[in-house]
Amino acid sequence: MANTYRNITVEGCHRFGGFTFIELLATIVLIGIIMPVAMRSIGLCTRLGGHSRRQIEAASLARTKLTELTSSQDWKTSEKRGDFGSDWPGYQWTAAVSNWTDSVVSQLDLTVTWQSQGQERSLTLSTLVYPEDD
């Protein structure tokens, strides 16, 4: 009787104590299929996050420069291009003034350009300006 109890206990441990070779092989194959897809998704999210960050920075820089040009009236006479100095390397700006539908008001477009992933990207902000007589 003791011998029978011992055999059942030993067999029970072997039966429920680990994974079979087929289960391990199936797990490895499943991981091999899922990992490349997951890594590609993580890489895509990282690139999109970087692109969004650069676009937000460009919009902020464009808004600041557009405000500076309109408040100081420099859009009439000063340089219409430049960069943002050593604080913001890689970003350049260009301003253009054009006629609007009303002949008294002009449209000021400020475009910020930068390089991202080997391509030139740009963002343009526009405002209407009224040339005051000095």
Image: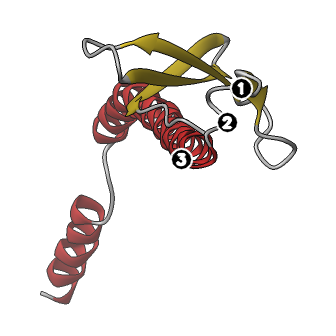
Q: Residue 58 in the image: x percent, y percent?
A: 56, 37
Q: Residue 117 in the image: x percent, y percent?
A: 63, 18
Return the residue nearer the eye: 68 or 94.
68
Badge 2 element: loop
Query: Which label belongs to residue 67?
Result: 3
Residue position for label 2: 74
Return the residue nearer the eye: 88 or 22.
88
Residue for point 52% across, 43% down = 53
Q: Which quadrant would the C terminus be assigned to in this image?
A: top right
Crowding near pointer 3: few (<14 within 10 Å), some, many (20+)? few
- Residue 50 seen by the camera: no
Between label 3 and label 2, give the one nearer the viewer: 2
- Alpha carbons under labels 1 and 2: distance apart: 6 Å
Q: Residue 84 in the image: x percent, y percent?
A: 76, 39
Question: Which tag, 3 or 1, sits closer to the chain's start?
Answer: 3
Badge 3 element: helix
- Seen in the image, is 7 located left or right of residue 30? left
Q: Residue pushed farthest right?
A: 86
Query: Which label belongs to residue 134?
Result: none
- Alpha carbons under labels 3 and 2: distance apart: 10 Å
Q: Residue 3 in the image: x percent, y percent?
A: 22, 81
Residue position for label 1: 77
The reply to whether dot 1 and dot 2 touch (C-beta < 8 Å) is yes
Amino acid type of the residue that numbered disc 2 sits on in the rendered structure:
Asp
Return the residue nearer the eye: 15 or 64.
64
Compared to residue 13, the image places residue 42 above or below, namely above
Amino acid type of the residue that numbered disc 3 sits on in the rendered structure:
Thr
Residue 91 quadrant: top right
Amino acid type of the residue that numbered disc 1 sits on in the rendered structure:
Thr
- Seen in the image, is 128 located left or right of residue 71? left
